[in-house]
Image: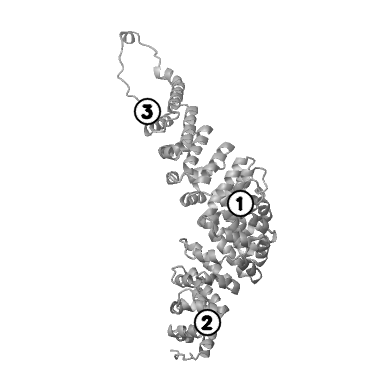
Amino acid sequence: MPRLTRQRTPQSLYSEWSQSYLGATISIHALAKPLMKPMYHRAVLNLIKRQQGIPLTAETMQIYESYLMFKYVADITKALILRKLEERARVEAEAQLVTDFLVLYDILLDAPDEDIRTNACWVLGQLAVHSSTRPAVVAVQPGARLVALLGDANVNIVRVVCYAVSHICLDLDGAILVVTAGAPEFLKQLLESHDEDVRKYACWALGELAVHSSTRVAVVAVQPGARLVALLGDANVNVVKGACYAVSQICRDLDGATVVVTAGAPEFLKQLLESHDEEVQWHACWALGQLAVHSSTRVAVVAVQPGAHLVALLSDSNVNIVRGASYAVSHICRDLDGATVVVTAGAPRVLKQLLESQDEDVRKSACWALGYLAFHSSTLARVVAVRPGARLIALLSDTNIKIVKAACYAVSQISQDRDGATPVVERGAPGFLKQLLESDDEDVRMCACWALGHIAFHSSKLRAAVVAVKPCVRLVALVGDDDVNVVTGACFALANLAPSRAGARALTEAGALDLVPGLIESPQVDVQRSMCLLLARLARHGYNRIPPST
């Protein structure tokens, strides 16, 4: 079937009749025009029928385009073509060809026919679903047009525009476009819509905008928190799912977290942990975790006591739920009351098992959770009791630096207890920790310093294990680190190696005494304290020569 093109008009031929009988004439074109629309509609129906089960080709796409551009093609025919293009765009490979439609989107969104506008938005939204075609959608900058349509009187158009916006926002460039056009305020209003799909897509759109830090501010500014929290109790589980996702993203900002806490989000989210819908459970976990990130809203999370539910979800068969639950537990544990609740629910043993997870995020969160539990003296013994040391030491060599950081922190906290320090030393922790002193990550260096210091603190035997791996030269070098936390940790380790004669000798040979004059006047109280202890302990072994300060 060829593309629709205007044929060249042939030169008129005058018959003897027309030359002999002059008078009124009838325009054949005028008679034919009413027949063109049904003729083209039938042609399109035949084309669609022939193309069923056949991949879309560039040639077929050109034919569809020609019909969309031709003014004598009926609106119903154009709407049908757009509906079929939307179906084609669901397949990513065919969506690449459908992007040719974008040259016409501006004209089609202006069409007086509502079905054409609606279906054009569906095509736009479906193209925005795929990461490979989304940039092409963003490139035509449809933000202002789409946001204007969010205020359309036709709920069908509003519904599909919400759908399109929610997917365009997946890319930062697309999110910036719709925010610039004022989308957040419209979307907040649409949370009140009587249409369930509109409410659902408005939730998802706000959530996707809040994913990006640069556009999250604009979402928080319109204060959608109270309405989103209300939708957590919606009768439609899909609306609840979207609202839960939006809340989880808005909570990444302290102002957003404060608003949703004030609206009573923690209690709703705790209830949603028991939802029959896995995605709702997953997003509820993440939302509670994000609220618990902020110290000012963590208290409200701990107050509703979600610990037992979250610990139960650590054993869920869905890895996404486990990932979210372990993240939430890791942050709730930063508060002593929260740590007490999750320990009582049996978290340490489950977290130890999760250190073996194949999912990197789960392993990372499990490390942080164990570390925060070990931070509190009242829950430290419960962590040490499940003996996670061997697995944590293995994770110090993980290929993911974030896991190494979390494992190193956990080891440093568990090592505060002699019963925790002994197993990690038996597993070769000092050698691993010495290597981590060379890490490019400052947090890893800091935690390695603290871990070595805690191990060396307990007994001459454990201290000897640290001295044996010869970390002193590197620790002395780290006293000059650019990061004050690394300096504090290095000074702490040096002070705890000094009580043994072998440690004192190694420190002196590494130049530790030369550090004292400069650091004993440090503005950091912990550094001053460590230097005083270092000086006293070295002097006990006869190493008391301090170079004059310059």
The percent coordinates of residue 81 (x first, y second) are 46, 31
The secondary structure type at the circle numbered 1 is loop
Q: Amino acid at mark 3?
A: Arg
Distance between mark 1 and mark 2 Cα atoms: 45 Å
Q: Amino acid at mark 1?
A: Asp
Q: For residue 531, say whether it is visible.
A: yes
Residue 9 — which label?
A: none
Distance between mark 3 and mark 1 Cα atoms: 56 Å
Q: Residues within 10 Å of mark 1 (few under 14, many from 20)?
A: some
In the image, residue 368 sits, relative to residue 446, either above or below, namely: above
Q: Locate residue 134 relative to residue 15 in the image: left or right.
A: right
User: Which residue is denoted by mark 2 in the rendering?
Assistant: 495
In the image, residue 540 sits, relative to residue 52, either above or below, namely: below
User: Which residue is denoted by mark 1 in the rendering?
Assistant: 316
User: Which residue is denoted by mark 3 in the rendering?
Assistant: 3
Mark 3 or mark 1: which is in front?
Answer: 1
Name the quadrant containing residue 460: bottom right
Q: Amino acid at mark 2?
A: Ala
Name the quadrant containing residue 547: bottom left
Q: For residue 263, say whether it is visible.
A: no
